[in-house]
Amino acid sequence: MQPDKQVYLFDFDGTLVDSMPTYVSVMLRILDEYSIPYGEDIVRIITPLGYRGTAEYYRTLGVTASVEELMARMSAYALEAYRTSIPEKDGVGDALRALKARGASLNVLTASPHAALDPCLKRLGLWDLFDNVWSCDDFDTTKADPNIYVRAAQRMGVSVEDVIFLDDNLNAVKTAKCARMRVFGVYDDSSADCAEEMRAVSECYVQHFSQLLQG
């Protein structure tokens, strides 16, 4: 499917690892603690925002705690699961190792903070496969900002149009496409209701990572 030496930029939660149930439960737990109502689209809204962006958004919904307090609470709730139990998604490790063997450049850009991201990738034996592992915190913005994709490409030393971005979140895929990246939507149970729309905006819709090795 892809030529050798291709540059990939992967999301983390829901793309490389099966963490979305944990991520969602942590984030919604905060709203529940404050008895803040939310709509059915809440997961789609907050997933690209990261901890800081989500905390700032929660403040607009009426949560009274500070952004820093909310971020600390989110991190504390999630950290143990990332460090001990969250698994890779089916076929991810094998596909990444095969792509690496072909000479591809593998990179990560995620809303998750390094405190959760780094130990999880290391525990799963995936850390050393990546040329760059970035949290949105490294760019002081979120994946809802098209400029983050341009800046990531610049840091990788390639044109933004030459990067394949993979994410399970529809909003992130749309934003990366607006930034002129090639976009591959990734299936995850948490975003199954967006599957058809994801197919429509993506160059490829990845239901299993073995698809990246075809052709």
Image (cartoon, rainbow, N blue to C red):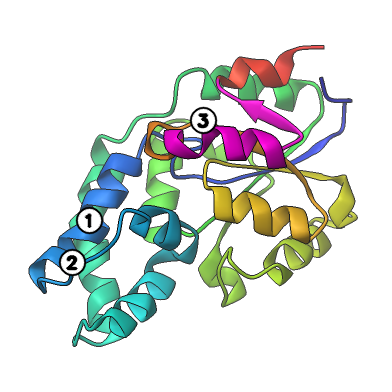
Q: Earlier in the sequence, mark 3 or mark 2?
A: 2
Identify residue type, mark 1.
Answer: Val
Q: The N terminus appears in which quarter of the rendering? A: top right
Tag 1's secondary structure?
A: helix
Near mark 3 (Cα within 10 A), the count class, few <14, some 14-19 or many ≥20, is many
78 to the left or right of 43: left
Along the viewing direction, whichever of 97 and 88 lies nearer the viewer = 88
Q: The C terminus appears in which quarter of the rendering? A: top right
Q: Earlier in the sequence, mark 3 or mark 1?
A: 1
Residue 197, x across and y down, in percent: 60, 40
Query: Circle 1 is placed at which residue position?
Result: 26
Magenta-colored span: 192-207
Residue 69, x across and y down, in percent: 23, 81
Query: Circle 3 is placed at which residue position?
Result: 187
Q: For marks 3 and 1, give the CA distance.
A: 21 Å
Query: Circle 2 is placed at which residue position?
Result: 30
